[in-house]
Amino acid sequence: MASSTVAGMTAAHEVQGRNRAVQGTLDDLGTPLAEVTFVVVDLETTGGSAADSAITEIGAVKVRGGVELGELGTLVDPGGPVPPFITALTGITTAMVTAAPRMDAVLPAFLEFARGCVLVAHNAPFDIGFLKAACAAQGYAWPAFPVVDTVDLARRVLGKDEVPNCKLGTLARFFRTRTEPTHRALADARATVEVLHGLIERLGSFGVTSLEELRGFAKAPTPEQRRKRHLADGVPSAPGVYLFEDAGGEILYVGKSGDLRSRVRSYFTGSETRRRVREMVGLAERVRTIVCATGLEAEVRELRLIAEHKPRYNRRSKFPERAIWLKLTAEPFPRLSIVRECRADGARYLGPISSRRQAEEARAALHEAVPLRQCTQRLTVRLVERGRARSCALADLGRCGAPCDGRESQGAYAVHAETARAIMEGDVRPVVAAAQVRIDRLASELRYEEAAAQRDRLAAFVRAAARGQRLAALARLPELVAARPGFDGGWELSVVRYGRLAAAGTVPPRAHPRPYVDALIATAETVFPPSGGAPGGVALGAPPSSGATAEEMECVLRWLDLPGVRLVELDGAWTCPAHGAEGLRRWIDNAYVSPDPEARQGRR
């Protein structure tokens, strides 16, 4: 009896021992932020993509516990010229980097400087992407650096009432940093250090005291995101479009996905760090979905819904009517004008063009080839005959025939206008020839930056002309039917009329496609020809109801360019001009590719 009692008491003590809380070690709490060594890095580059651009400057600052331990800053020879727009932004010129060390000498020094540390960058994917590309190019394995992005932290810590955006300059002003960002690597890295310290101080109120908590904080879903997870219930796993709506039925955001369920659920997880999207999720009360037959249909429906409803949380594609065009006016003395509307008014249009700067570059390239007047006055025959037109200095420079003061007759000027019209309708050879002459002359005089500026003008013109010609060719087709192999062994079908996606469908595996094609054509949307119909862009200026927007047609063209796509039926001739810009796009793109590093070294 006594022995059994002792045994029972012993078992009870063992159970209590297992259930009793045990104080954890300091290791269980993570690495305190005061003991973490951060290396804050910033880069300047020749462009926005690591695939076709290079690093021109590296700046890095090593800090621990709020104390600076060291700095690394150097210019880097990218192996080619620095584009003029980069020089204007950063002040770094080709002459400055010519004598700088190359990446094969700089990269080992940076990797040793940052060894064993946590990398910090403002918009880290950009800088880390370039550093990884540099490691791959030099044959180094990328070290497994922990990475902290101050943009992600700022989006979580700061409210929109405190800062309008999370740009480095905005955050530097908010935290009153001693160093002002100047688009130079070391200065920006120093400013980012102070921004990081300001953010860490704010994170204290959230209970973030360790490196592990710091890295997880930016990726953790907000309470509002967790509360709204039920909105993804019932969303199908199919391609289509999703619409976030508020309590009043207003559409807040429109998106597309090949798997609606997976995409919508991601909005309620920590992987969604965009502040404006998190704000949108907080306002949303329902998610409406539209299942589509194909990914192309989903992409086109998304564009149409965004253009129609203009949701406040969408940024792209909201205003297709604001496209930019280069216009050769229809008047006695035509001139080139940059406009935001394409009309059937007898004028010739080039475009649409992505930005006003690109339109100005394209106009300058055309002016180099054809001596059209560059004044903005509306010049009439009567105004010229009465001597009331204003003249400018371009005539004295030989850049204009001066029809304004009668030095060039209306008939002589009409020859220039007809040449410009022919160029905009398809024959771009005069622009290319004029640009090549100027580029060769400037290069022979070692004026490389000016030659690069001429190249940029030519590139802007060729890309705008190629885009317009491709879109105009598609917009002229009464009907195009194409098929693409599906992932399940069937086919994806598309019916395109005057550039507009009129119908989309699928053919099941092992089924004969003809009945499905006939049924899809019979039920496709009726699309009327765009008004105007003249080549060179007029057809693209028609209202969307009678054709398609440029963005929709580019979606269709991308789909038609995919591997395996086959033309089923074609009504009309689908062609681009023989001497047009389409064949020059690759040539222009190659002009921006840096030469082979070994070849550059050999020329030195």
Image: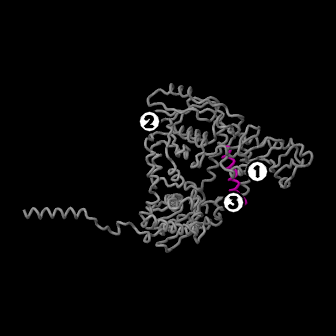
Q: Which mark is residue 488?
A: 2
Q: Which residues lie in the magenta part? A: 443-466
Which image quarter is the N terminus in? bottom left
What is the distance, in whole Å, between disc 2 and disc 1 at their CAs?
A: 54 Å
Residue 401 in picture, x, y percent from top left: 85, 49
Callout 3 touching callout 1 (CB < 8 Å): no
Q: Residue at x 53, y 26 (%)?
A: 519
How packed is label 1: few (under 14 Cα within 10 Å), some, or many (20 or more)? Answer: many
| 570 lies left or right of 457 | left
Earlier along the polypeptide chain: callout 2 or callout 3? 3
| Residue sitting at the far left | 1
Residue 528 in picture, x, y percent from top left: 65, 31
- Magenta: predominant secondary structure element? helix
Element type at marker 3? helix
Q: Which mark is residue 449?
A: 3
Residue 19 higher or lower than 456, as above or below: below
Residue 277 in picture, x, y percent from top left: 52, 52
Element type at marker 1? helix
Residue situated in front as seen by the camera: 504 or 410: 504
What is the distance, in whole Å, between disc 2 and disc 3 at their CAs?
A: 53 Å
Residue 270 in picture, x, y percent from top left: 45, 54
- The three-letter amino acid code for the residue at tag 1 is Glu
What is the distance, in whole Å, between disc 3 and disc 1 at their CAs?
A: 18 Å
- The three-letter amino acid code for the residue at tag 3 is Glu
